[in-house]
Image (cartoon, rainbow, N blue to C red):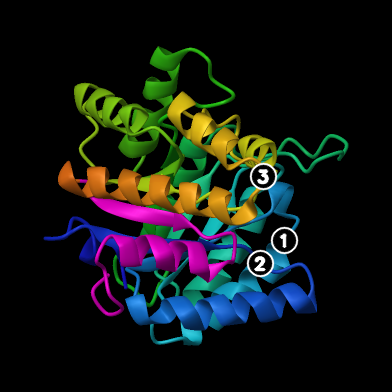
Amino acid sequence: MHITDILPAASPTLSFEFLPPRSPEAGRELECSIEKLAPWHPAFTCVTYGAGGTTRDRTQALVARLQEHPAFNPIPHLTCVGHTETEIVLLLEGYAAAGVSNVLALRGDLPAGAGPLPEGDFPHAADLVRFIRRFNDRRSHPCRRGFGLGVAGFPEGHPGTPNRMLEMDRLKAKIDAGADYICTQAFFDNHDFHDFRDRCDLAGIRVPILAGILPLTRPGSLRRMAELFGGSRYPARLLRAFQRAGDDAEAFRRVAIHHATTQCADLLDHGVAGIHFYTLNRAEPTMEVLSGLGLAPGRG
C-alpha cells in the first residue's frame, strides 16, 4: 500500500522495524517474531539496510518474505553512502517489479572498520529523495504514483550535524525534495520529540512525523544502543531506575517496558501521527508495550 494512502490517518499508525538476520538461528528467531507481531497488522514494516549496503541481498530477501505475508507492508531502507545512480536504479527496479510501493531514503553510515568507500552519487539524503522522485516520473511502476518516500528525523539531534539550525535546513531540504513523511530515530525523553515536532512546524515542515520507540530490555545494552543510534540521550530518571534494578535482569526489563509504555501513552495523548517500534527482531518487548497501552491484536 502506498504511504500516502496510510498517512495522515484518522488515528495514529503503528509500524515496526526488522533487521535482516545474520544467521539461520537469527532467521528462525525473526520468523517467530514476525508471526507474533502479525496480528497487530502494522501500517508498514521497515527493513534495514546495512552500512554501505553490506546487507543488500539479505535486505531484499526479507522484503520479499514480508511482501508475501498478508499482515505486512514492507518498506526497505535505501542509503546514499557509496552508491551510484546505476545501483540505486537497479534496486528500485527490483522493488518495483516485486510490488513494493515505498522506500525509506537515508544517508547511511560507513561499515565499521571498513576503508573508504567510493564517493557515490548522493552526498545527502535529499539528493537520494530527489533522484527517486525523478525515477518515479520517468519509469513505469505498478503503483501509478511511484514510490512513497520516508526520511529520517533526529529528535535528539543528528550526530553528524551539531549545528541544530543547519540540521533543520537539511531536514527541510529532504521534505522539499519530495519526502512524504518523517520517521524519527529512537529517543527516550518525549520532551525531545515534542520540541523537535515544534521546530519542524516553525520550519514549515508539514508532513506526518512518526515517533521511533525502542524498549531497552537487556542489561548492558545501554552503551551499545547509544552507539547504534548515534549517541542516544537517556533521561536521568530512567538511568536512576536502571541503577535501582542493578543486576536483576527481570527488574531491568520491567523498568524498560514501563518507560516505553509511558512514552507511548504520552505521545498518543499529544496527537502523534504514528509510533514506530525498533524491534531488534524481538517481538515480546513490543507486544508488552502494546498490551500496556490497551492495544489488543487487530487494533493497532
Q: Which residues are magenta?
A: 272-300
Which amino acid type corresponds to the residue marked 1 in the rendered image? Thr
Of residue 51 and residue 179, the one placed in the foreground of this image is 51
Q: Between disc 3 and disc 1, whose residue precedes?
A: 1
> For the C terminus, which image quadrant?
bottom left
Q: CA distance from mark 1 to mark 2?
A: 7 Å
Which residue is denoted by mark 1 in the rendering?
55
In the displayed structure image, the side of residue 23 where residue 285 appears, left or right: left
Q: Between disc 1 and disc 2, whose residue precedes?
A: 2
Which residue is denoted by mark 3 in the rendering?
221
Which amino acid type corresponds to the residue marked 3 in the rendered image? Ser
Secondary structure category for the residue under label 2: loop
Of labels 3 and 1, the one closer to you: 3
Q: Between disc 3 and disc 2, whose residue precedes?
A: 2
Instruction: Verify whether residue 295 appears in magenta.
Output: yes
Residue 180, position in %: x, y?
30, 49
> For the N terminus, which image quadrant?
bottom left
Of residue 140 and residue 267, the one placed in the foreground of this image is 267
Q: CA distance from mark 3 to mark 2?
A: 20 Å
Q: CA distance from mark 3 to mark 1?
A: 23 Å
Of residue 193 and residue 128, the one placed in the foreground of this image is 193
